[in-house]
Amino acid sequence: MRDQVIDLGPPQRRAVWAALAVDAGRPVSVPTLVGRVWGEFIPAEARSAVYAHITRIRRLLTAAEKADGVRMSLERHAGGYLLDVDPDRVDLLRFRRLAELALDKSLDDRARVALLREALGLWRGRLLEGVDGAWAEWARAHFGLYRVEAVVAWARLEVDLGNHERVIPQVHALISEYPLAEPLAAGLMRALHAAGRNAEALEVFATTRRRLVEELGTEPGSELCSIYQSVLRGELDGGAAPAVSPASLQRARPSVARPRSAAGLRPASPPPCTLPAGIPDLTGREDAIAELEQQCQRGGPSGGRAMVVLSGAAGAGKTAVAVHVAHRLRAAFPHGQLYLHLAGLSAPRTPADAMGQLLRALGVPRGALPRDIDERSALLRSLTVDRRYLFVLDDAADEAQVRPLLPGAGSAVLITSRRPLSGLEGAHRLALGSFSDDEALRLLGSVIGVERLACEPAQAADIVRYSAGLPLAVRAVASRIQTRPERRLAAVAAELAGSNRRLDLLASGDLDVRASIGLSYRALPPDSRRALRKVSMLPLGDVPVWAFGAAAPQEVTANAGTADGGRRRSGDRTAVADRGAFIVDDLMGLHMIGSAGLDETGWPCYRMDDLVRAYAWERAFEEDEEADRWAGSLWGSRAGITCST
């Protein structure tokens, strides 16, 4: 006080003081104080020790008030204690206030940069110096991320004002602490470019890229790559912004009471990341990846969460793309990136079980998990609200499985599912289709080698065509080829041409097209499975909607009223089309067929790819009696189908 350092005493007392100061103006419960001071191993006398430290701290505050003339008190409050002091006397709280004031767009850039300079000037030395333990480490890592966001905003304003030389040493020093923070690298590159030091700017990019590849197995994000290209062209200007904007500070309002208390919450330090490793040879999907990155970073209305559903057929590569995007977005979601496999169509996890895994990853001990599912969901939202978490919910079964797992406002959730999950309000949806021929060939070449591909280009094209452009199928056949270097591609293509064995050949280890399609097939209602089997035997490329109705049992229309009060005969094509629409909804919902426009008479038509057709054909001969009587044109002529192939 009055520029004097007051000795608080032993480390535990300093920890009690720190635990109160970071929440100055708000009550802190005794269990929370105990958890912050002792962490996992709480002695029996912990509460008594806290009371003793509180008494001593009160005496110090009384002495300080007399010396400094500024009132500070430590009040008993609802099962805990509240440090009653002007928040501006706590450096951390003053930093947050100044950083948020700098977001006011009505201020000019000079006023805003002055606020950020003052805020960052409060970071003197190590946060919570002299305080050890898990909570202190968590707090240093946690609040350090807010410092990074403030530095990124400050650097951008300084460069815009022509003060690039001020930026370079400070950002360079901070990058040594956060070597994987792409926004810092972007800010440093802009400052170096403004100073005419383009070679150094390019070296910053190269160093950051090398670290990302070596440590995370991912390439830099689109923002950093854009700045790199602009530096190369000498075209960088104020339009190229780092990925973390000043607006992200507005969303960062942490409550450090959450990380740990004796009742159950402990810190997650460093921030949790449970993402699986990405696929090193991920191929194609550039447009989808760019769209997913953009949508995941776009908050919902009124500061809500960003929610993106990535759907697609079995084997389309949804998980690989989602994990790749999540790794690229780690810097944009500094508080954590959590992955959860929901096993949607095999053995769907219950929401309660899934929430338990998420909460444990966020630092909640197993014994402290609420039993009630609604309470678990509320705790999950409370722990993530106003923070930047990214959840990847992989292979979701339906909306009911997902809803309780959604994080609080400020975070983002990327969901993969074979279904579009149209009932999730406010979600952005993207469907992942088959590979183009070029993408499929690139994947094939990345596995077996481009030299081998170049020796038999026509046969390679046949292989990817027989794989129907399905990434899982291409990777499976490529893995088989890779293990048999003596085999020519022509022989593999010839084997695949025999459709009776195609699904056998599109399997390698756990890369199994038949098993993957089988999960979707078994998720269909019985009537839709039966219709799929029958339609698979039609010698048609595009199948009209009423053909699916003709293949379905009459009962499907029991709830599908008609405009004329049900007077149509079931054989009328319009009535049969009504029946087919229900079947089509089921099949489209699992991406087992795709839209093929209208036929010449105006009926909607649908297309089944060769692999789904081959699987359905197999099931027909396994499940249907005398399946051969439905084969080929015989059943088609009975249904009155005249569509051209």
Image: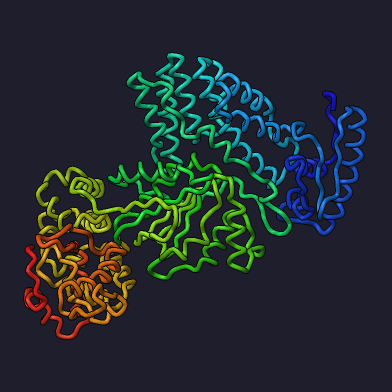
Say which residue appears at 61% left-offset and 49% top-offset: 268
Identity of the residue furthest to the front in this view = 564
Q: Which is more toward the observer, 188 or 104?
A: 104
Q: Is residue 552 above or below residue 224?
A: below
What is the quadrant of residue 140 in the picture?
top right
- Which quadrant of the figure contains the C terminus? bottom left
Say which residue appears at 70% left-offset and 34% top-offset: 92
Q: Is residue 435 above or below residue 628?
A: above
Identity of the residue furthest to the bottom in this view = 625
The colour scheme of the drawn protein is rainbow
Q: Decide if residue 583 is on the left or right side of residue 381.
A: left
Say which residue appears at 51% left-offset and 43% top-offset: 333
Q: Decide if residue 360 is on the left or right side of residue 346.
A: right
Say which residue appears at 16% left-offset and 68% top-offset: 501
Q: Position of residue 605 (x, y in %)?
A: 17, 62
Answer yes or no: is residue 496 visible.
no
Q: Which is more toward the observer, 611 or 487?
A: 611
Count of residue discs: 0
- Which quadrant of the figure contains the N terminus? top right
Q: Position of residue 531 (x, y in %)?
A: 22, 75
Q: Position of residue 430 (x, y in %)?
A: 34, 51
Q: Which is more toward the observer, 423 or 130?
A: 423
Answer yes or no: is residue 48 visible.
yes
Q: Decide if residue 637 is on the left or right side of residue 180.
A: left
Q: Position of residue 338 (x, y in %)?
A: 50, 52
What is the quadrant of residue 387 in the picture?
top right
Q: Is residue 372 above or below residue 293?
A: below
